[in-house]
Amino acid sequence: MSKPTETERCIESLIAVFQKFAGNDGNRSKLSKTEFLKFMNTELAAFTKHQRDPGVLDRMMKKLDLNADGQLDFQEFLNLIGGIAVACHESFLAQK
C-alpha cells in the first residue's frame, strides 16, 4: 500500500481534530458550543487570543451553524476551516 499523499494526511488530520473535540458533550458527530469554544481556544489560540470582542466566537458559531441546531456538524466545521484557509491564502497573496 502506498503512503498517503500530503492532501490525504491533511484530510485525516482534520477528521482527527474534529473527532478529538466532538462527543465530549454526548454527540460524537457534532461540536456543541462548549466543544467549539474549546476547539477554538486550543487549536486556533493565536486567533482567539487577539480578539478584543468577547462575543466574536458566539457570533462565529451562530453564522457557521447553518441548520440552527446549536451545534456544528462536520460540514459546518469544514466551512470554518475553509474560511480561515481562504483568508490566510488571500493574506499571503497580498504580501507578494
Image (tube, rainbow, N blue to C red):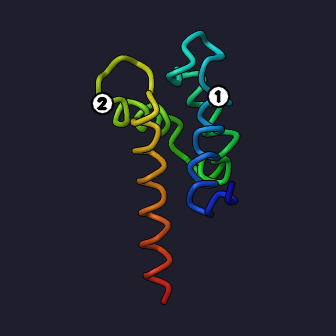
Q: Quadrant of residue 37?
A: top right
Q: Secondary structure at mark 2?
A: loop
Q: Quadrant of residue 15?
A: top right
Give the percent coordinates (x, y) of residue 17.
64, 38
Residue 92 shown left or right of residue 20 in the figure: left
Q: Secondary structure at mark 1?
A: helix
Give the percent coordinates (x, y) of residue 67.
29, 24
Frontmost residue, 49 versus 87 = 87
Q: Residue at x 48, y 49 (%)?
A: 81
- Count of marks placed on residues: 2
If you read the primary sequence from the N terminus, does the residue marked by circle 1 or circle 2 appear first? Answer: 1
- Residue placed farthest to the top in the image? 26
Residue occupied by mark 1: 21
Query: Can you say which quadrant of the picture contains the N terminus?
Result: bottom right
Residue occupied by mark 2: 66
User: With respect to residue 91, does 42 lie above or below?
Assistant: above
Q: Amino acid at mark 2?
A: Leu
User: With respect to residue 75, does 1 lie above or below?
Assistant: below
Q: Residue at x 40, y 44 (%)?
A: 79
Q: Amino acid at mark 1?
A: Phe
Give the percent coordinates (x, y) of residue 5.
61, 62
